[in-house]
Amino acid sequence: MTPYPIRLRRPKPEDAAVVCDLVIACDVEDFGSPDFDLGELLDMWSGFDLQHNVWVAENAGGQIVGYAFLEEDSEEKLFSYGFVLPSARGTGVGTALLTAIESRADELAATSGRHKRLQNVVPTLREDAQTLLRTRGFVPVRLFKRMSIRLEAAPAAPDLPAGITLAPFLPGVDEQDLYAAYIEAFADHWDFAVPGFDTWAEQIDRPSFRPEWWLIARGRDGDIAGFALGRMREDTLYLNQIGVRRSCRGQGLGLALLQTAFHKAYAAGQPSISLGVDTSNPSGAFRLYEKAGMRAVYEVTVAEKTVQPGSPA
């Protein structure tokens, strides 16, 4: 397709519905079905620096045809993602958005005086997007799969390990204990960076947060042994994180947490469950989810480049 004039600007609140529709159109084109809704977009925007780290791209007619964001995950790592309306692909929108992301990464590296690892995510099967990243110096570093299941009948009751009890998260009570359990459970995961407590706790303040979809498993001593933290999106329960403390692994707790989430979702009349998983996760999570009956529906590639202070991104 022939490139056309593109204008990048910062998003405004009234852009949210259009941007959401754009992301959904990309999901349908790239993966066959949507994996996003307006509530999730608003959750994300509530934690983003919209004036510096988020862009929308407009064509000459003022139509929003692209969207991208950058997250400052840690002092060292920057995470980014871009979306181009399927009908506008091949017109330079993706290149313009990636250039903006790289320029922002260069600013952050210069301001901090230290190098940054800039990551970007693209659908693995999108050869055009993969090629663009390669030409800009990005190297693939990890693969993640989206896994899902739709329950056609009531699932079997979970088989909890001896001494384990499950209960919903209690706001104002469980935050500190869960934060500590989260850090321990994910410490050996790829590229894990310990967030500050306040940063981690921001998810509890998001508009879509519902404590009933956060499951806490406690051992006989009352300490948190594991957790499954979910968010209901329309008719799908999306499990953001499932974690088991190292000392509690090997007892079937991860599977029991997953089965409990299945059971609760089905009982609520919402039988679809979805999650993302690192295919190289050392805990064997991918095999666990397959054992529970989940199947991979698509894959994305995380690519990375290093941005040095004082040098172009």
Image: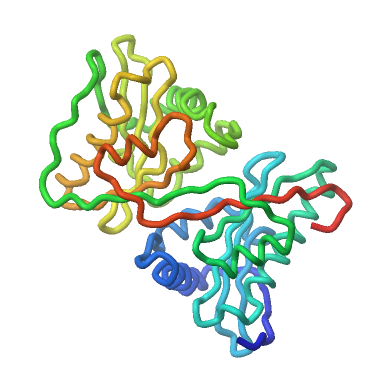
Left or right, residue 44 beside residue 7: left
Q: Quadrant of residue 37?
A: bottom left
User: In this view of the protein, which residue sits in the foreground, 226 or 234?
Assistant: 226
Q: Residue 228 placed where, x, y %?
A: 35, 35
Quadrant placement of the C terminus: bottom right
Q: Residue 256 placed where, x, y %?
A: 25, 29
Q: Is residue 80 above or below residue 287?
A: below
User: In this view of the protein, which residue sits in the foreground, 185 or 198?
Assistant: 185
Identify the residue at image location x=60%, y=79%: 90
Identify the residue at image location x=35%, y=36%: 287
Left or right, residue 70 beside residue 24: right
Q: Residue furthest left?
A: 153
Q: How many marks?
A: 0
Q: Is residue 115 above or below residue 251?
A: below
Q: Residue furthest right?
A: 310
Rendering colour mode: rainbow
Quadrant placement of the N terminus: bottom right
Q: Residue 164 placed where, x, y %?
A: 26, 18
Q: Quadrant of residue 114?
A: top right
